[in-house]
Structures are given as structure tokens and as C-alpha cells.
């Protein structure tokens, strides 16, 4: 305080830290000469491992688990939505079925169809991440995210050549037919 006035000194501080640079993949770095040369040529384009990189299995599990938990929750919502749709369709098309029959078939269809659709989305995210990591730098992160989102959107769009269905719906129906075919052959082999 000088002569009755407060003097404050404000210094900007970062509340959130956001780095668009991709992290160096240890597996790719150790097994791909092209990737290793790309990282070594421009190390400032990458988030390099720091001195605390070996924190142990528990810390690595927490880091990996974060993305896995979100993926599992998203897959769970997809499966639950498919199960509900299947139950409603089965209820209308098979009014004579018991509650157990409806639940059993709806659970099967929800798991197979929802799992197929979730698998396609996880594969799209993985493809985007792989391509983004190979490109490197902030551009790689953005390109990888764009590719992953683009694949997911493209597979969700409905096309006339698929009968007004999306790639995800067509793949889910094919997976369900495959499961039904296996169950039918199983029943013939071992009797029902």
C-alpha cells in the first residue's frame, strides 16, 4: 500500500494446459525406423516422454483406463439402445412370445448388433489415432481426429445401395445372421 492506494501485481497463469502435439508411441518408436527418424528429425513436434515415464503399472493402468472407461460406457449405451429397439420390434412382430423369449432374443440382438456398431466406432477411432500419430505434430492430432470422426460419420450415413441403411446397420444385420446361422448349425449337430 502506497499513500492509501493498493497496488496489485497480476500475473497471468494458465489454468488449463492443452497441447495439440501427439505423444510419441514407444512401440512405434522402438519397432519402426521410419517413425523413429520422423520423431528424431523434429522432436519439437512431439510430446516426448519425461523423466517420470516409468511410473509403474498402476499409473499406466490409470492413464490407459481413462480412455477405456469412456469407450466402455459409450459401447454400453449403444448396446442398450440396440436391445431396446430389438425388444420393441420383437414385441410387435411376435405378440405370442413370453417375456423370457422376448428378453432372451432382445439381449442377443442388442449384444451382437450393438457390439458390432461399437466395434466399428472404436476401429474408426483407432485408425484416426494411428494415422495422426504417424503424421506427428499438432497437424497429426487434428488430422487423426478428423479421420476418426469422418469414418464414424460415414459409416452412420444411410445409403440407397444398402436399402436405406447405414454401413453399421448392414454390418450389424450380417453379424446377427452369422450368429443365427451358427446357432442353427449347432442345434442340428447337437439336437435341440
Image: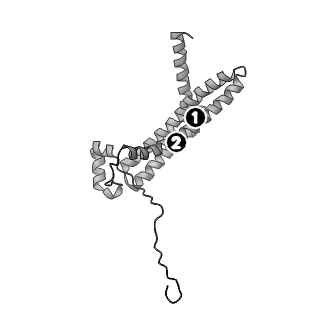
Residue farthest to the bottom, as pictured:
3
In-front residue for pair 27/72: 72
Q: What residue is disc 2 on?
A: 152
Q: How many numbered marks does the figure carry?
A: 2
Residue 153 x, y percent position in the rendering: 54, 43
For image coordinates 49% across by 79% down, the residue present is 8
Q: What residue is disc 1 on?
A: 79
For image coordinates 69% across by 21% down, the residue present is 98
In-front residue for pair 181/104: 104
Residue 33 x, y percent position in the rendering: 27, 45
For image coordinates 30% across by 51% down, the residue present is 38
State the SS at label 2.
helix
Which label is found at residue 33? none
Of the two numbered discs 1 and 2 on the same chain, state the one appearing first in sequence. Answer: 1
Q: CA distance from mark 1 to mark 2?
A: 16 Å
Residue 56 x, y percent position in the rendering: 35, 46
- Is 78 drawn above or below residue 108 in the view shown? below
Residue 99 x, y percent position in the rendering: 68, 23
Scheme of image coloration: one colour
For image coordinates 50% across by 41% down, the residue present is 71
- Is 128 drawn above or below residue 44 in the view shown? above
Query: On the picture, is 80 further left or further right than 55?
Result: right
State the SS at label 1.
helix
Quadrant for residue 92, please give it. top right
Instruction: For the C terminus, give its image quadrant.
Output: top right
- Is 20 drawn above or below residue 84 in the view shown? below
- Let me know if residue 164 appears in the view: no
- Is 8 drawn above or below residue 32 in the view shown? below
Crowd class of label 2 (few under 14; some 14 to 19; many from 20; radius 10 Å): many
Amino acid at each position: 500500500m502506497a499513500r492509501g492506494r493498493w497496488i496489485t501485481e497480476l500475473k497471468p497463469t494458465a489454468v488449463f494446459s492443452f497441447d495439440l502435439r501427439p505423444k510419441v508411441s514407444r512401440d512405434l518408436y522402438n519397432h519402426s525406423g521410419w517413425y523413429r527418424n520422423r520423431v528424431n528429425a523434429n522432436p519439437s513436434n512431439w510430446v516426448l516422454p519425461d523423466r517420470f515415464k516409468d511410473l509403474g503399472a498402476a499409473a499406466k493402468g490409470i492413464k490407459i483406463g481413462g480412455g477405456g472407461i469412456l469407450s466402455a460406457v459409450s459401447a454400453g449405451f449403444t448396446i442398450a439402445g440396440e436391445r431396446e429397439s430389438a425388444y420393441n420390434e420383437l414385441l410387435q412382430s411376435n405378440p405370442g412370445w413370453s417375456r423370457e423369449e422376448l428378453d432372451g432374443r432382445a439381449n442377443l440382438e442388442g449384444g451382437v448388433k450393438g457390439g458390432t456398431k461399437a466395434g466399428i466406432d472404436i476401429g474408426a477411432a483407432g485408425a484416426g489415432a494411428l494415422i495422426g500419430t504417424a503424421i506427428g505434430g499438432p497437424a497429426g492430432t487434428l488430422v487423426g481426429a478428423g479421420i476418426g470422426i469422418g469414418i464414424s460419420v460415414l459409416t452412420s450415413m444411410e445409403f440407397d445401395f444398402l436399402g436405406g441403411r447405414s454401413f453399421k446397420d448392414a454390418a450389424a444385420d450380417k453379424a446377427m445372421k452369422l450368429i443365427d446361422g451358427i446357432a442353427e448349425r449347432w442345434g442340428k449337430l447337437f439336437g435341440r
